Each structure stands twice: as structure tokens, then as C-alpha cells.
Amino acid sequence: MKGLNIHPVGSTNADKLFMIRNAIGVLSLTRNPLNPLMWAHYGGNHTGGVVAIDTIEAGLESPELNIITASKGGVIYTTMRPSVDGDHLPYHSDLNSQHDRLMLEKLFLYKSLHWSYEEEVRAARRVDHTPQVRHQDFEIPASAIKAVYLGARYLPALVDDHLDRLPRVHLQCAQYETYLCFQDSRTWDLHAEHYTP
């Protein structure tokens, strides 16, 4: 007769993955503020804004603060999902920037090839796990903000916003270099020109 396969709570890979997902936060960024697909999907169909940040001033390059720094966080786009089957996963408290690079990539940097248009970069760091909280903000100091890009449909959207539901980003961020995006009349590209509110 076979014995029971009993593991202490938290010792299986499934348990460790659950703890990692709850204890490590990932900030997703893009390399290109003028990526038309990013604007269509995440920029309110060109009515929103993009904030350009200096990753050093934002603390995203610090190996003491981040398990994966922004400069080492380029997403790896593949057709196959990475597998951690057979790997010995670390406990979330043991993860740091000096950890095995391949393991960090498997845990945080792989994504389907279908998403490669995003040109995504990630930073990962430990967060305080609070049950029932789906996300936590990464604190980015104001000094790290270098520019604000307003979408190609931002100003027309404000004109149509009779209930004042949209934030007046161009007024709230007037201290930053501001650009207004526009679509090229001959290509599908976006461009930006300096904008003064």
C-alpha cells in the first residue's frame, strides 16, 4: 500500500507561485510613447495620455528595490508558455535581483508573441501583500516625470466632455514638457509636437 504524499503548506510549486503572485508587484511600461496600438488599447483610443519617466530617478533601476530592474526587464515574446514544472521554485521572500536569471525570466518576463507590439518593459519588486487588494501602485516621484504625451483625440474629447468627467491633464501637468500627438496624414504613424496649454 502506498503512503500519502504529504507536503508542508507552502512547499509545493503551486503554493510558491501563489505566494509570488501576491508578494511581487510588476510595473509594465512601453519603450515607445508613439506606438499606435498602445494608444488604441491603453490610451483611451487616443483620448488619454502617456507619462514619460526617467527610470533611474523613478527608482526602477535599483537592484536593492527591484527584483527585476527596468533596464533588465525587456519582455520575452514567445509562441510557447514557459514551464516551471520540474524546477525548484524559490520562496517569494528569497527572490532578489541576484537570483537565477532564467528563473526570473520564466516568472516575470515571458509573454505571448501576440503581444509583441507592446514593446513592453517590466520592473518587479516586493509589495506588501494585502488580501482583497488586486493591485498596488508603484510610487514614482514627480522628479522622475520628464514629459507628458496627450493623445491625438485628447483635445476633441475634452470639447465633448460636457459633464467634466475627463481629467484636464494638460492643466494638471503644465510643469512638464508636454506633447500633443497627431496621426501622420500619409502613413499610420503617430508623431508628437510640443504643446503649450
Image (cartoon, rainbow, N blue to C red):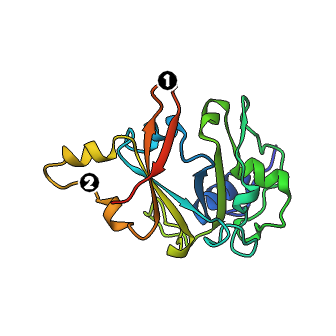
Residue located beneath label 2 in the image: 166
Q: Is residue 192 left or right of residue 8?
A: left
Residue at the image position 74 percent from the left and 58 percent from the top: 71
Label 1: few (<14), some or many (≥20) within 10 Å? few
- Label 2: element kind: loop
Tag 1's secondary structure?
Answer: loop
Where residue 74 is drawn, which disc sits there? none
Considering only vertical position in the picture, is 118 above or below 135?
above
Quarter location, residue 77: top right
Q: Work out how far the residue at label 1 is from the one at label 2, CA to CA, in angstroms.
A: 30 Å
Q: Which residue appears farthest toward the left when viewing the image?
A: 162
Query: How far across and how far down the image is residue 115, in percent?
Result: 61, 35
Question: Which is nearer the eye, 87 or 197?
Answer: 197
Pointer 1 or 2: first along the chain: 2
Residue drawn at 33 percent across, 60 percent down: 197
The amino acid type of the residue labelled 2 equals: Leu
Residue 9 screen position, x and y as percent: 67, 63
| Residue 138 relative to residue 7: left or right | left
The residue labelled by disc 1 is: 186
Amino acid at the residue labelled 1: Arg
Q: State the residue at coordinates (66%, 61%).
A: 124
For residue 180, side relative to residue 171 (left or right): right
